[in-house]
Each structure stands twice: as C-alpha cells, then as structure tokens.
Amino acid sequence: MRYVVACVFAGLIATAAAAQPGPGPQPMPGPAFDQKVKQVMAELDQREMQLNVEQRKIALLRRERELDQQRKSINERFADKKPGRRGLLQSLKDVGLPVNLLPYVIMVKLLALTALCCAILHLLFTVVVFRDMQKRGTMNGLWIPIVVIGGVCGVVAYALMKEGPGRERG
C-alpha cells in the first residue's frame, strides 16, 4: 500500500513540475558575443601553445641532464683505465655489454673467419683449375663458374671429367 501511495505522489509531483512554464527561448547572441568568443578562443590557443613550448623545454632539459649523466659515467669509467691492449672480456665490460655475450661474440668472429677461409679456398680452387685448363690447352669457360659455385665438389667434378674413361692420363 505504501508503494502505491508513493507512486501516486511521485506522479503528481512530476506532473506539477512539467506544467510550470520555464524560461523562454534564449535570444541569439550578437556579434559582440561572437567576437568575445573568438577572443577567448584565441587566448586559449595562445596559452596552449605556450604550454606546449614549456613542456618541450622541460623535456629537452631532462634529456640534456640524462646525457650529461651518461657522459660523466663514461668519463669516470675510462678516466682511471690505463691505455694499452685490453682483452675482449674487458672491452665488453667497458662498453657496457653483459659478459654472458662473450661466447656469442667469439662465435661470430669464428664464423666470419670460416667464411673468409672458404672464400679464399674457392678462389684458390678456381685459379688451380684455370691454370690446369691453360696447361692442357682446353679453355672451356664452363668449369670456372662450376668451381666457384661448387667449391670442392666442382674441383672433384673437374678432376673426374679431366681423367674420365677414354682420356689420356698424364
């Protein structure tokens, strides 16, 4: 019963509030109001630009401070170092790399050395095959790229073709 009375009372209050006349339509603002709005907007834009400039200055100052601290730490690290030959481990520590990268650094250096040796061997094989072809008087240009690309396999193929069945040895 209370619920029904509360609903009826709320409906009466809502109807009375809706029946009261409110303020009428607002008159359109004039050109003076528009000019004032434009002026306020221009001031807001100018303040926003000033704020952005200030934020950029602060960010630059922070970055300069960080760079100065990094320079100081690097200078402190190298100030007491004796000039001369240092090992790879000490070089890694000086640069700031973790020492557990040492096996990878060594592996990369060995891989580069192996690639260099393979390139030298391919060149050596090519020269040997070319000189043999000159000595025999058979200048077939097909074997040079085969040896350059194939390496040891190309040299073995050339040797088998050179001394294959039905060919003179010697």
Image: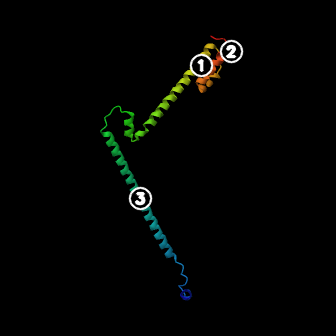
Label 3 Cα neighbours within 10 Å, binned few <14 / some 14-19 / many ≥20? few
**Residue at the (43%, 39%) spot, across then down:** 101
3 or 1: tag closer to the N-terminus: 3
Amino acid type, callout 2: Pro
**Residue at the (46%, 70%) spot, across then down:** 40
Residue 86 percent coordinates (x, y): 36, 33
The vertical placement of 65 against 105, above or below, is below
Q: Tell me which corner region of the image, top left, top right, bottom left or bottom right, holds residue 96.
A: top left
Amino acid type, callout 3: Gln
Q: Which residue is mark 3?
A: 55
Amino acid type, callout 1: Val
Q: Which residue is mark 2?
A: 165
Give the label, 2 or 3, closer to the camera. Answer: 2
Q: Which residue is mark 1?
A: 129
| Residue 52 in view of the camera | yes
Residue 94 percent coordinates (x, y): 37, 39
Residue 79 percent coordinates (x, y): 31, 40
2 or 1: tag closer to the N-terminus: 1
**What's the CA distance linking mark 2 and mark 1?**
20 Å
